[in-house]
Image (cartoon, rainbow, N blue to C red):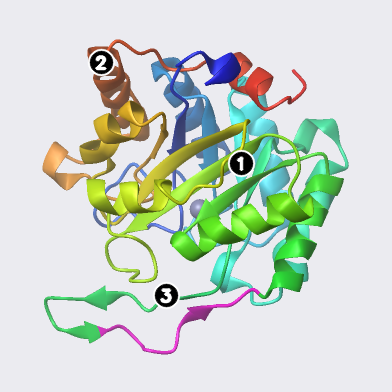
Amino acid sequence: MGVLDGRVIIEVRCNELTMRDRNPHVPWSPDEIAADAAKCREAGASIVHFHARDARTGAMSGDVGVYADTIRAMRAVSDVLISPTLGASTIADPHERVAHIPLLGAEAATRPDFAPVDLGSFNIDPYDPATKTFRNETLSYVTNIAGLRHEIDAIHDSGVLVQSVLWNVGSARLLGAFLDMGVLRGPVYAHVLLANTFLAAHPPTVSGLRALVDFMPDHPDLHWTYSAVGANALSLVHAAVESGGHVSIGVGDYHYNELGAPTNADLVAEVVRMVRSVGREPATPAEVRQAFGLGA
Ligand code: ZN
C-alpha cells in the first residue's frame, strides 16, 4: 500500500466528449473546467482528467493552446493533479495523438502530471441491446506496439507520468510485458476502464472489475483505479476500495440522472462519504504526488 497508507485516490473524469443534453454540468471551457476542478478538489478529489473542448459548441478541441489555457486555469485555482487526454480513436496516428504532451511539458506551468495510454487495440462500436444493433460497425481504435511505445516514450520524455489504461485482460498482460521490457518505468498508475456499451472492455460489475484486477501484474509500486463508462460508478466504490483500488468518476462518463444530474463535485462528495463509511480517507494531491514521485 506504500506511502498512500490506505488513502483513496479520487480522480474526476470531468467531461470526456459528453454533451449537456442529459447532464447540464459538463464543463467545456478552460474556466469552466478549472472552476469544476477546484470544487472537486474541495470535495476530496486529487486528480482531474479532462478533454479540451470548444468553449461554445463543446466539440472536441485538438488545439494545444486550449489544453495549455485549461491547465493554466486549473493550476491558478487548485493544486489538483492534472491528466489531459490523448486523442484516442478520434486521432488515428499515435504520433499525432500524443503531440500536445511534449508541447505542454516544455513549460512547468502547463506540464500535465499524468497522460493516459490505452494499452491495446479495440473495436469501439457501441452496442445497443435495446435495438440489438451496433451504431456503425466500423469504429475501431487501433494502436500497434510501436505506436504505444512512441506514446509512452513521448510522455516520459515530457516529464509526465503514464496512466496505463486497461480495457481487458489483454491490456493487463501488455502492461506486464511493458514493465518487464522497461518500456514503462517507475510507479505504475493503472486505470481499469469498465464500460457498458464498449464490448471490448469488461462490464461495469464487481465480477468484471475483479476479473481484470486478478490479472494485474505483480509490481511493488502499482496503484490502480477504475472508471465505469456509461454506468453508475458508485456501485463499485466499496468493491474497489476493499480490494486496494482507487476510484475515478465523473459526469463525463455517465449522466447520473437517477441522482438528479449531479455535478462532478457532488459525485466526489458521495465517493468521500462512501470511502469514510468503511473507515478510509481520500488522498490529498500532495500525498498522490509523493506516491508517484512527482515534484510539488
Ligand atoms: Zn478521457
Q: Are marks 3 and 1 in contact (CB under 8 Å)?
A: no
Determine which residue is flagged by label 1: 83
- Estimate how packed mark 3 is, as few (under 14), some (14 to 19) or many (20 or more) residues with alpha carbons within 10 Å: many
Q: Nearer the viewer, mark 3 or mark 1?
A: 3
The type of residue carrying mark 3 is Ile
- Estimate how packed mark 1 is, as few (under 14), some (14 to 19) or many (20 or more) residues with alpha carbons within 10 Å: many
Q: Are marks 2 and 3 in contact (CB under 8 Å)?
A: no
The type of residue carrying mark 1 is Ser
Q: Is residue 208 magenta?
A: no
* Residue interval drawn in magenta: 134-143
Q: CA distance from mark 2 to mark 3?
A: 36 Å
Q: Secondary structure at mark 2?
A: loop
Q: Is residue 140 magenta?
A: yes
Q: CA distance from mark 2 to mark 1?
A: 28 Å
Determine which residue is flagged by label 3: 124
Q: Which mark is residue 278?
A: 2
The mark nearer the N terminus, 3 or 1, is: 1
Q: Secondary structure at mark 1?
A: strand
Q: Is residue 171 above or below residue 92?
A: above
Q: Residue at x 28, y 33 (%)?
A: 237
The mark nearer the N terminus, 2 or 3, is: 3
Task: Work out whether residue 118 can be spotted.
Answer: no
Q: Residue at x 35, y 69 (%)?
A: 198
The type of residue carrying mark 2 is Val
Q: What x and y, as percent, mark residue 193?
A: 42, 53
Q: Secondary structure at mark 3?
A: loop
Task: Work out whether residue 241 can be spotted.
Answer: yes
Q: Main secondary structure of the magenta part?
A: loop
Left or right of residue 228: residue 107: right
Choose top left, top right, bottom left or bottom right for residue 277.
top left
